[in-house]
């Protein structure tokens, strides 16, 4: 698409997402190059068309996972302003807000996405589970996580945390084992890595702006037996 029309912004937004997702499957390996490519294409999408919402959404998404929290918030706000009826953007925006501690707004945006697109893809439920887990509403987190297969190899960690915080020890251990199995299948780091190494990677991977939020996640991983 880019070869056919170098002024078309949407392929760059798509490549930004692809490079980011590809980096998830390089777990434990240096992924700076993939992250850099994701950011470059997201920026290029916005440069080519500042009025197209997906470019801003992908710039927000990549910025969030790069630890650029203010930039992520601005980009998602702009994307939502440009296209308030795009359910995908609303759900990603909800995830960004939850990671930054704006839980009520995140849940409202997520519910809006579900209403806007009642035939939504399964990843909506995965994102909603993460949002509820981050907000401390663990029963809802478990309920939504159990509706779908894990979106990524690290996804069962969220279920393990939620179950452990609810005292659902058996289910927490099952989810923790699923997390370890999934991480082992894609791990690109030290072959001697242990479950705690996987859990520490997860802690570093999740973009959280403050020590208190990271501490709660660490507590849940420890309760699940992963640390």
Image (cartoon, rainbow, N blue to C red):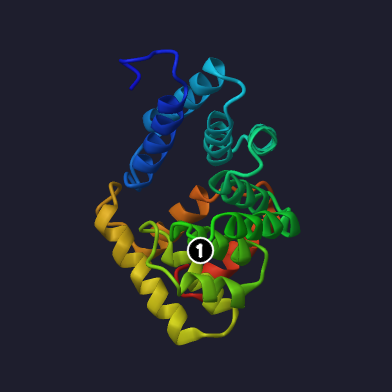
Residue name at image x 34 percent, y 41 percent: 22
Residue name at image x 53 percent, y 76 percent: 143
Mark 1, residues whose alpha carbon is within 10 Å: few (<14), some, or many (≥20)? many
Q: Position of residue 195 (x, y in %)?
A: 37, 65
202 left or right of 187 in image: right
Pointer 1 residue: 125
Q: Position of residue 37 (x, y in %)?
A: 41, 26
Q: Where is residue 123 in the image (x, y as percent from the top left)?
A: 45, 57
Picture quadrant where residue 133 is located? bottom right
Tell me the quarter of the image containing the N terminus.
top left
Q: Is residue 35 visible?
A: no
Residue name at image x 67 percent, y 64 percent: 135
Q: Position of residue 194 (x, y in %)?
A: 34, 62
Picture quadrant where residue 214 is located? bottom right
> Element under label 1?
helix
Q: Is residue 158 visible?
A: yes
């Amino acid at each position: 698409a880019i070869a056919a029309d170098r002024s078309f912004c949407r392929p760059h937004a798509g490549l930004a997402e692809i490079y980011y997702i590809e980096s998830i499957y390089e777990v434990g390996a240096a992924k700076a190059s993939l992250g850099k490519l994701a950011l470059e294409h997201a920026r290029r999408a916005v440069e080519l068309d500042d009025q197209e919402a997906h470019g801003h959404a992908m710039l927000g998404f990549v910025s969030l996972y790069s630890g650029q929290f203010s930039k992520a918030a601005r980009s998602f706000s702009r994307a939502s302003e440009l296209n308030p009826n795009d359910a995908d953007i609303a759900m990603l925006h909800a995830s960004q807000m939850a990671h930054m501690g704006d839980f009520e707004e995140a849940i409202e945006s997520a519910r809006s996405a579900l209403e806007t697109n009642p035939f939504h893809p399964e990843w909506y439920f995965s994102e909603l589970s993460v949002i509820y887990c981050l907000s401390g509403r663990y029963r809802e987190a478990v309920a939504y996580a159990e509706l779908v297969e894990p979106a990524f190899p690290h996804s069962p960690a969220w279920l393990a945390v939620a179950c452990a915080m609810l005292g659902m020890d058996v289910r927490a251990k099952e989810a923790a084992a699923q997390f370890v199995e999934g991480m082992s299948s894609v791990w690109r780091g030290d072959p001697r890595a242990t479950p705690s190494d996987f859990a520490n990677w997860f802690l570093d991977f999740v973009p959280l702006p403050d020590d208190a939020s990271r501490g709660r996640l660490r507590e849940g991983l420890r309760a699940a037996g992963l640390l």
